[in-house]
Amino acid sequence: MTAGVLLSSEMRGDRIELNAAGSWTAEYAGAIEPQVEAATRTVTARNIAINITRIDYLDTYGAWLIERALRNWTTQGRDARLVGLREDYRGLFEKVHAGTQTLSPAPPRRNSIIATLESVGMTMAGVGGDLVLLAQMIGSLMIAIKRVMLRPTTFRFTSMVHQLERVGWRAVPIVLLITVLIGAILAQQGIFHFRKFGADIYVIDMVGVLVLREIGVLIVCIMVAGRSGSSYTAELGAMRMREEVDALRTMGFDPIEVLILPRILALVIAVPILTFLGSMAALYGGGLVSWLYGGIQPEVFLTRLREAVTTTTFEVGMIKAPFMALVIGVVACVEGLQVQGSAESLGEKTTNSVVKSIFLVIVLDGVFAMFFASIGM
Amino acid sequence: MADESIIEVRDLVVELKGNRILNGVTLDVYRGEILGFVGASGAGKSVLTRTILGLLPKQEGRIDVFGVNLDEAGEMQRQEIERRWGILFQQGALFSSLTVGENVEFPIREYLDISDRLMTEIAITKLEMVGLKPDVYRKYPSELSGGMIKRVALARALALDPEILFLDEPTSGLDPISAGDFDQLILTLQQTSSMAVFMVTHDLDSLHTICDRIAVLGDGKIIEAGTMDRMLASQHPWMRAYFHGVRARTGLLAAARS
């Protein structure tokens, strides 16, 4: 195959005939286009004919380039014609000729400062919208709970147990591993710095209070948000994309009751258990490091721990757990149900779910800190 | 019909998870023909298509596309082949994060070095060729109806003016009028560009009205390949049930009338 060329020839008075030859195909379109452009600019004759008898191969690309030149000339009020159209290319030319190419102009690009301000404003409005959606979800959840309590047989017990296995039981190893490490790191850092004041023994107070009140529940919630919250969002999102949620609704089931209630209940049950296990693991890690690194005997550690922490310390951590689980579950489900048709939207909502639930968990932790301080716990 | 075959499949064996799906398939697709490919659900039509396209591995046999053995083709040769075929997936498989225009321009941008202006014009030409209005150019696939998605996907499959077009159940999910239009569209496009069309279908109307040849897959082999008359004359029980069943009558009537 040879590249397509447009040769000018025979200028007869006011009439010119251009000869096209070679392959006018996609492959050579890049090389042909400038020639056609040049011809449309330079040819001045009133009557123009493009002779295509010598074209070897022609496809949409070549046909469109010829059609474009003809249209250009015609709109300039000149007489442009196609000569030597072979029968087998007629259909192609008719198709291309029928195209209107009327594309409405792209919306103008806006001032970047205004665009930035607008996106800030939209984000803030989005935050407001999110809060409304969260409140709505909690409301529908309450209604679903009421309905289930009136007719306990409708509760999806199997589904909840299944979710409990996924978000609770299967999360145990990774939660234990991470919290042991966190406890160990806390203790090591404490010993390293407290030793300068000869206050090594207070490491036990620090680890005990910190782990039971704050770190245990926070680490577990962050893990759960990343592990289970994201999977809830992705699952519900995919179900929405494949119209499974709509299918449920048309069969007379409430998706909140069937899909969301068991999931959130499973989280509310699993997170306190994981928090308890995680806190114990962190204390264990702290004790181990205190012994091996700080030389504090286990008996000393335990005695000191008993003096340092009270049941209240433990309670403060555990009370927070179910509320945080609720926040993670509600955020994950709200985001999941927001997923639109595209794959991009699924990814975006999953990210949102994790980011928002971790943010809200930390905000909630701050609110609880103030609350407990004011009631003296 | 020219006798030059664009695709040659010889003694193809494909196993999936230990199940032998295709057991010695031999099939030719000739230049410039529309080949209808039928078979019971689960017979392995999609498996054969996906194997030819290189999406599934094969155990035995050989596949030649444009005279090149796919096993021996190097990276460059493979790309060259991929440039020359277009595929319409059953659900359209449009990239949901790109606009319609970007979807159609996607293969053009990858394979050809042409100006942005020409690229846009070609994309719009293709969209108009498949019967869409140019204003879908800036829409996202999620804003389109099922029929429109199929058309956009067809425009994308045609973006590089392929020599062979693979269609996976092009008319499934379309209403009979749209399906008929779509058949005619494929026929017109095929005639204007003289490409070959490999069409997996269950639509008897399509088989009657636009297919030059039909190949039937059963028991992991090609039971029969040939014109509609041969299909109707066949004594194979599945084919008799298929081509002479209740639903086949309307197709026969339609063919008789036209």
Image (cartoon, rainbow, N blue to C red):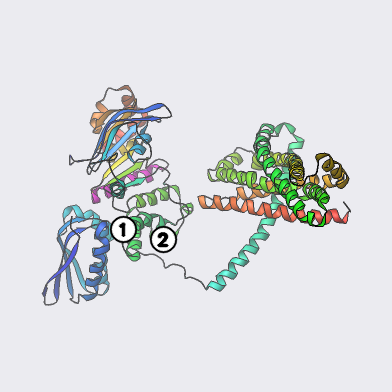
Badge 2 is on which residue?
B135
Q: Secondary structure at mark 1?
A: loop
Observer-nearest residue: A193 or B240?
A193
The span shown in magenta is B170-193
Given the image, on which type of amino acid does mark 1 rest?
Answer: Leu
Residue B139: mark: none
Judged left or right of residue B156, residue A77 is left
Observer-nearest residue: A351 or B30?
A351
* Residue at image coords 60%, 70%: A117
Judged left or right of residue A358, residue A117 is left
How far apart marks 1 and 2 lie (CA) works out to 24 Å
Q: Secondary structure at mark 2?
A: helix
User: Residue A198, percent across and down?
Assistant: 82, 54
Given the image, on which type of amino acid does mark 2 rest?
Answer: Asp
Residue B112: mark: 1
> Is B185 within the magenta?
yes
* Picture quadrant where residue B174 is located: top left
User: Residue B229, percent across and down?
Assistant: 23, 31
Observer-nearest residue: B222 or B106?
B106
Chain on which label 1 sits:
B
* Residue at image coords 39%, 64%: A103
| Residue A342 in sight | no
State the predominant SS element of the stretch in magenta: helix
User: Residue B132, percent across and down?
Assistant: 37, 55
* Picture quadrant where residue B249 is located: top left
User: Residue A318, percent across and down?
Assistant: 79, 44
